[in-house]
Amino acid sequence: MTFKNIRTLLLGGVAGLVTLAFSPGAYALDFNLGTVSANLDTTVSLQAGIRTSAQDCTFISKSSGGCGPYNMTANGDDGDINTKQWQPYTTQLQISQELQLDWQNYGGFFRWKGFYDYWGNQQLGTNSTRFGSRPLNDAIRGDGARDGFNGAGFGARLLDAFVYGKWDVGGNPLNIRLGNQVVNWGESLFIQGGINSYLGYDVTALRTPGSELKNAVTPMPAIYASVGLPANFNLEGWYEFLWNPVHLDAVGSFFDTNDFFGPGGAYQVLGGEYNGLVSKYGGVSQAINGGGFMLRGDDDEPSNQGQFGAKIGYYADWLNDGTDLGLYYTNFHSAFPILAYTAPTSTLLKAGQVAFASQRYLAQYASNIHMIGASFNTTLQDLLGGTALSGEVAYSPNMAFQIATSTILGEDLGVASTGGSLTSAGDIIPSYRRKGVVTGQLQTVSTLSTTSPVTDFIGADLTLLLANVGFQYLPNTSGTDHLSINRADQYSDNPLIDSVLGSGQCPGGISANGTCAGAKYASSFSWGYRLMVSPQYNNAFGTSLTISPLLVWSHDVTGYSAGPIGPAFIAGVKKISTGFNASYLNSWNLNVQWTTAFGNKFRNYAYDKDFASATLSYSF
């Protein structure tokens, strides 16, 4: 199996990789529509996930019963509050279909999915835990968190929908596709933030038990073309017609780490939690007018135009018996939101309080991000019986990185305190900085047959080994840029800002010079690696059952990555995923996994969110 095949299967996620990498395709329905040949593949699945770790009070705000020493923000704990140990976070029925049409040198491909999540639709946010509950809907949010196209309860989504043609032009192949499609360039496996940063995602699909990454990558409405050229060269290009943002976790759902951006996000609380603030001010409108809530404003979205990419490929048959090389350029608008605020009509400095009633927060999306990149893909024949080796490096001169919240508000506040000019009332306070960034990664894929001592020792028929290491480097960045990382908004270098905004809660205590000890903002360099092993046992127990155990190790070694586009390394964080996949007659499939995260507790939002998941599916 070539590396390109493995990489394509990785777009099916870990579960999809284990299911598909070693087995023929599931049965599908083949039929003809006149002279058009058609293939319809249908999968029905039952999915369930439960929380296996107990709630940790340090990840709950003190206003909701949490504990110190550092107060978790009340704008980021709803997901932790709503799900207790051994309680489901999802119970879902899902159906997906893929339709392939072919006629002469033309064709079409269409893919959709529909789902109903009983727990997300009926139970989530209604069951009290030891920290109470945070309903997904309230007087301000409405029912957006359960919305059929966006939320946690149910929905149907069209994924791919494109037509294509293939021609021979002067002896060179020409392919053109038009419609909703995924164009995935570069060589990334597990680590993101590189050449394919222009892709959008449905994050909720990644959370689904047994998820396939192909269902999580958002197809883009685009035209794509590729043409082969003489001397082993080829050209590819795409132009996107419609910008789409990432689809985030619904507020209050298990994996939610902020309570204001995802479906249902309508406000930030200031100085308490929802019920307490409504009671304190004597009503919802009074709490809003009194500054207890900051409402969400209109998001700052980019144009639908101006996103495109170009690639020059070259097959070097003279290099290591054959190596694929690629050069890339893309211009895209970020699909990931950056937290921004509008300036209030007035700023009040008294009693450590800011008048936020007229202020709004919003999602801001940076436009016209430039990226150039290079990649290679080859095979090391003498390593483990043949190992695919690939890598990429990418550079963006103007990547947009989130600034820490306390800095966004504090810079405007600081200007006012010194008699300077505030951002004009209602205008967006600068919320991100444009910085040059270099990312890179290497990966190996080894498929060990029965002749391998490793496969023979464990009695398997085949063993898949994957390794992926990557980095982020910001050459012109320092801590004074205040690029945000997890919990960076809980302190500031400015004593006035600490006093007014209530920040200054420093991890590790206060250092001798009065500022926060330890890392506070994104590092200039960060790196980490991922390892995966999955043996395969055919005809297990003398049956037609194929069983593939799985072990994935993830380690963020040093540094803190800037984001939202990037590899998201958090120094010291480690994750383990283990489980198995069982396939019967290439139609029935059972996937069971357990995931735990540990290390760097203060900044690791997954620290107390260990979970187990199971998926039973039938394909026909």
Image (cartoon, helix red, strand yellow):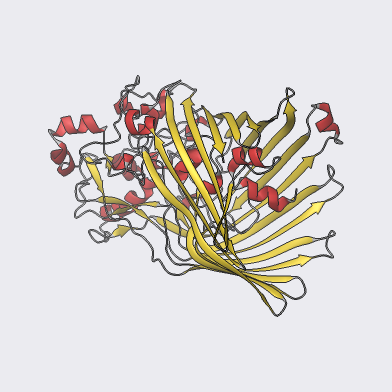
Query: x and y percent of residue 43 in the render?
Result: 53, 41
Residue 502 drawn at (x, y percent) = 31, 38
Position of 90 relative to 344 (above/below): above
Residue 72 visible to an observer of this rendering? no
Find residue 101 and report its image quarter: bottom right
How many marks overall?
A: 0
Q: Which residue lies furthest to the bottom in this view?
A: 170
Judging depth in this view, the residue of 326 and 42 nearest the camera is 42
Relative placement, left or right, of 600 versus 430 is: right
Assign the C terminus to one quadrant of the image: top right
Of residues 604 and 544, the one drawn nearer to the viewer in this rendering: 544
> Which is more toward the observer, 443 or 108?
108
Q: In front here: 550 or 435?
A: 550
Above or below, comparing residue 248 to residue 322 in the picture: above
Instruction: Tell me, yes or no, if residue 446 can be seen here.
Output: yes
Residue in the picture at 23% in, 51% down: 359
- Above-or-below relation of 419 to 29: below
Q: Position of residue 373 (x, y in %)?
A: 63, 63
Residue 230 horizontal/vertical position (percent): 75, 76
What residue is shown at x 45% (from left), y 70% (from top)? 306
* For residue 88, side relative to residue 475 (left or right): left
